Amino acid sequence: MPDGLRGLGVSPGVGAGPVRLIAGAVPEPPVGDRHQGDADAETARAVGALEAVAADLEDRGAKAGGEARDVLSAQAMMARDPGLAELAGQKITEGSSAPRAVHEAFGVFRGLLAGAGDYLAGRVADLDDIRDRAVAELLGLPMPGVPESDEPFVLVARDLAPADTALLDPAKVVAFVTEEGGPTSHTAILARSMGVPAVVACPGCTGLAEGTVVLVDGGSGQVRPDPSGEEIVRAHAAVAARSAALTATGPGATADGHAVPLLANVGGPRDVAAALAHGAEGVGLFRTEFLFLDRTAPPGEEEQVAAYRAVLEAFPYVVVRTLDAGADKPLAFLPVTGEEPNPALGERGLRMLRRHPEVLEGQLRALAGAARDLPVELLVMAPMVADAGEARDFAAACRAAGIGRAGVMIEIPAAALRARDLAAEVDFFSLGTNDLAQYAFAADRQVGALSRLQDPWQPALLDLVALTAEGAAGTPCGVCGEAAGDPALACVLTGLGVTSLSMSPPALPAVRAALAAHTTDQCRRAATAARAAHDADTARQGARAELPGLSALGL
Ligand code: PEP
Ligand code: MG
């Protein structure tokens, strides 16, 4: 066991607790895998595994209660289906090993469900989950998916997919640690929005034994196994002292009174309370994918209206992003057309919606309907816009749906370079620095080994931000990528001409304090110093030298 591990701290704070691992995918038992000769014993093993999985699902359902209990007991019933055990038994009689026989038996059931209409096809994922659990049980592997735990824990995984994290109980997770991922990966974004400390790109973390207590420092990126009680207390005290220093409230502004609205990034109604608690002036990025994940058909317009309304009625100003499907956010009902060797460069975001205009039109109608009679100012923007023609078409679709203010995210370098052309077509810009960095540096944001290239302090990224703000020529130009939540970088972005900042809610107090401690002139000087640097580290140091208020605030 290593003394300590180090990764990239992407969500500040400290957390200590026992490790719970999310197991990787359960491997398919090899074709032709055969048992030793005792078919009866092997059949008993298969039946026993199915029963163990059913009992476990039922048990978890009973603990969870509510809707989860119904879903899990339906899954338990599938595992106990006598047809399944019979089919597996037949395959074992023909010589197959129990894991292979179970895998193949599920395959037959899967084929039947997949061809049986939309509702049943939606259950295929449940069936796959039961199959993986039964095979894991037989092979002695850890159970797949988010682990169950009665006590708070540190979640350790290779990486987290949006579908895993949708099921997380935020009260149970004290920290995240992943091997993969960078500062803009989903794990990092989720952790920041939950206010949970997180370390990503941490080699060796999945080698930590289940149950080992670790101390995770989401600022420094350190992960310490078996910390002393005193170390844990000290780490918590340091974090508490820092957050006590950040008590300012009210709208965002620099020391000389230049207003910079401070907005929240939200992923659905469950983030509203945190955004309000941290004093968000509105929402600068409402990621709408949450409603579409894990579905085989798009949600109906009424369901969409209800979900959007829960956010729109909480704030005076909300920027909604239309569905950003594809690549790292795959949706079952919007499959890509052909092979995509490079999904991040494929059909995602607005490109996907241009191929499925009915999905875009439905979402825009639902948004207009949700805002009706509310005092909210609704703005709608499209992700992954490449050029002025796409911006024009999107703005026209918004107008046709009765949405007054249409904008685009600037996350493709081509759009930043030609910001002036795009500004002529829309009412506002929002810089998605997570993807803008990914595409500017040709570095997949999910790949931990490339996290250096995802650093938002890279001068080339700052140049693209500056070009966009300049090309906007009076069109409001905010930032909603993770860069906006870094207090020093928030000052730099303001100095580059960005007009609003949207971030994970827990980041708001530190950014508010950093802006209030510096004048617009200081922000401009910090921006000039950062752009004059030749790499991210010197850009950060150069900017900080112009922002003396940061260290006074402990930032
Ligand atoms: C971005 O790319 O910066 C952004 C805000 O969008 P997402 O992280 O959801 O891709
Ligand atoms: Mg993006």
Image (spheres, rainbow, N blue to C red):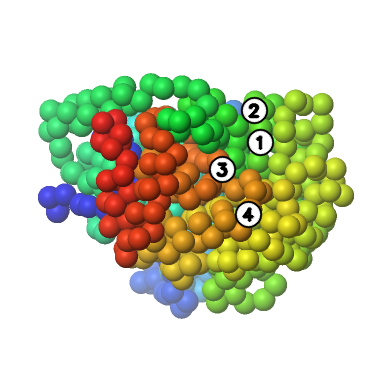
Q: Is disc 2 in contact with disc 3, using a CB cutoff of under 8 Å?
A: no
The residue beneath circle 2 is: 315
Amino acid on which the number 2 mark rests in the picture: Phe
Which mark is in front, 2 or 3?
Answer: 3
For ligand 1, tell me if the residue under mark 1 lies within 8 Å.
no
Percent x, y of residue 216: 26, 41
Q: How far apart are the two marked residues, 2 and 1, measured between alpha carbons?
A: 7 Å
Q: Quadrant of the C terminus?
A: top left
The residue beneath circle 3 is: 499
Q: Secondary structure at mark 3?
A: loop
The residue beneath circle 4 is: 472
The relative height of residue 222 versus residue 325 in the rendered view (above or below) is above
Q: Is disc 1 in contact with disc 4, using a CB cutoff of under 8 Å?
A: no
Tell me if 368 is positioned left or right of 520 in this view. Answer: right
Which of marks 4 and 2 precedes in the sequence? 2
Which of marks 3 and 1 precedes in the sequence? 1
Amino acid on which the number 1 mark rests in the picture: Val
Q: Is disc 2 in contact with disc 1, using a CB cutoff of under 8 Å?
A: yes
* Residue 318 numbered mark, or none: 1
The relative height of residue 134 versus residue 347 in the rendered view (above or below) is above
Residue 170 can be seen, yes or no: no
Percent x, y of residue 359: 78, 54
Which mark is in front, 1 or 4?
Answer: 4
Amino acid on which the number 3 mark rests in the picture: Thr
The relative height of residue 210 versus residue 24 in the rendered view (above or below) is above
Q: How many marks?
A: 4
Q: How far apart are the two marked residues, 2 and 4, measured between alpha carbons?
A: 26 Å
Q: Residues within 10 Å of mark 2 (few under 14, many from 20)?
A: many
Of all residues shown, which one is farthest toward the right? 400
Q: How far apart are the two marked residues, 4 and 3, measured between alpha carbons?
A: 11 Å
Percent x, y of residue 130: 53, 52
Percent x, y of residue 68: 57, 35
